[in-house]
DNA sequence: CCTGCGATTTGCT
DNA sequence: GCAAATCGCAGGC
C-alpha cells in the first residue's frame, strides 16, 4: 500500500481522523492498523492549542501538516498526534489504539510484562511504549523516514466507523470527536450503546 | 519561583 | 471502582 503523503493530512482534522482508521502506522517497521483516533483543534477547550494558545510544547501543531506532535504526560506517558490542516491551523489527530500487526514480538518486549495481543497497543500511551516513540520523534514528518503511515489495505477499504465522545478529558465532552473501527477488539475502551451511534 | 494537574496505565479493593 | 505513580507544563503570584 502507498504511504500517505503530506496532502492527506492537509485536510479537515475530522476527515483525517476518520480516514486514518484502517491505515497502518509503523515506526521502523513496528506497529499495526489504526483502529481509534481523536480530533483536537484550536476551538476545542480540551485541546492544548485551545484559543490558538501557542507554547513551546505545542509549537509543532501550528506548523505544516503531517508531522508528529509527541508530548509527555502524567509523569510517565508519551502520546502521539499527527498535525493536520494547513500550516497555521492548529489541529491534530491523537492516535489512541492499533491492532498489532508488524513486529509483535518487539512490541511484547517493550511492553513487558504485558504480553497479551489485545493489551499491546490499545491505548495512546501503550502505542508510544510499544513503538518506542518519545520526544526524539517530536516534529518529524510521518510521510518519510522512520515513521510512516500506509493507506488502507484490502481488508480495510470500507471500515465501519462510529464516533463517540473523547476519553480522558473534562471539558469538550459533548463533542463526538473520537473515531473507532466499530468491529475492532483492540479499542482503548469498548463501545457502549450510549456513545456508539454514528 | 510555586503549585496543581494532566488527551494514562496499572494494580489493588 | 479507585488511587498511586511521577514530572514537566502552564498559569498565577
Image: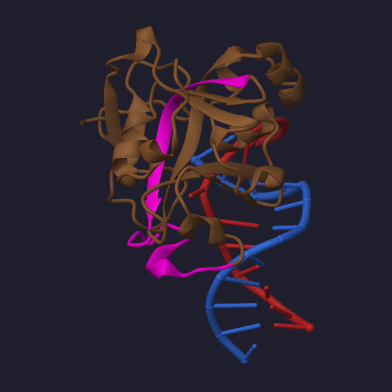
Chain colours: A brown, B red, C blue
Q: Is residue A31 left or right of residue A162?
A: right
- Depth check: give the residue in front, B12 or A190: A190
Depth check: give the residue in front, A31 or A145.
A145
Give residue A2's quadrant in the image. Answer: top left
Horizontal arrangement in the rendering, residue A191 relative to residue A61 (left or right): left
**A160 versus A195 height, above or below:** above
Can you tell which quarter of the image residue A163 is in? top left
Q: Residue furthest left?
A: A198
Find residue A165 and report its horizontal and vertical position in percent. 33, 42
Q: Residue at x 41, y 68 (%)?
A: A52
Q: Residue A98, image x and y in percent?
A: 51, 24
What x and y, as percent, mark residue A144?
A: 57, 33
Residue drawn at (28%, 25%) of the image: A161
- The percent coordinates of residue A109 (x first, y second) are 76, 19
Magenta span = A30-55
- Can you say which quadrant of the picture contains the C terminus of chain A? top left
Q: Is residue A72 magenta?
A: no
Name above or below for residue C1 compared with residue A25: below
Q: Is residue A39 highlighted in magenta? A: yes
Vertical order, A35 against A136 (above or below): above
**Residue shown at 60%/61% (left/top)?**
A57
Quadrant location of the N terminus of chain A in the rendered image:
top left
Q: Total of numbered circles in the picture?
A: 0
The residue nearer to you, when weighing A2 against A186, is A2
Residue at the (75%, 25%) spot, across then down: A110
Considering depth in this image, is A149 or A185 the residue closer to the camera?
A149
Q: Is residue C12 left or right of residue A196?
A: right
Amino acid at each position: 500500500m502507498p504511504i500517505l503523503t503530506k496532502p492527506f493530512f492537509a485536510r479537515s482534522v475530522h476527515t483525517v481522523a476518520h480516514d486514518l482508521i484502517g491505515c497502518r502506522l509503523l515506526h521502523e517497521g513496528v506497529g499495526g492498523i489504526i483502529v481509534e483516533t481523536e480530533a483536537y483543534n484550536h476551538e476545542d477547550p480540551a485541546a492544548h492549542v485551545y484559543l490558538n494558545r501557542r507554547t513551546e510544547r505545542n509549537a509543532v501543531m501550528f506548523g505544516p501538516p503531517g508531522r508528529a506532535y509527541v508530548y509527555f504526560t502524567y509523569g510517565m506517558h508519551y502520546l502521539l498526534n499527527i498535525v493536520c490542516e494547513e500550516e497555521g491551523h492548529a489541529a491534530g489527530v491523537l492516535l489512541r489504539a492499533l491492532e498489532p500487526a508488524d513486529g509483535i514480538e518487539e512490541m511484547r518486549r517493550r511492553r513487558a510484562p504485558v504480553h497479551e495481543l489485545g493489551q499491546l497497543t490499545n491505548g495512546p500511551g501503550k502505542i508510544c511504549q510499544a513503538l518506542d516513540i518519545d520526544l526524539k520523534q517530536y516534529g518529524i514528518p510521518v510521510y518519510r523516514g522512520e515513521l510512516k503511515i500506509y493507506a488502507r489495505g484490502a481488508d480495510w477499504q470500507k471500515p465501519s466507523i462510529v464516533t463517540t465522545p473523547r476519553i480522558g478529558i473534562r471539558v469538550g465532552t459533548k463533542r463526538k470527536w473520537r473515531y473507532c473501527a466499530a468491529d475492532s477488539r483492540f479499542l482503548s475502551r469498548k463501545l457502549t450503546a450510549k456513545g456508539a451511534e454514528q
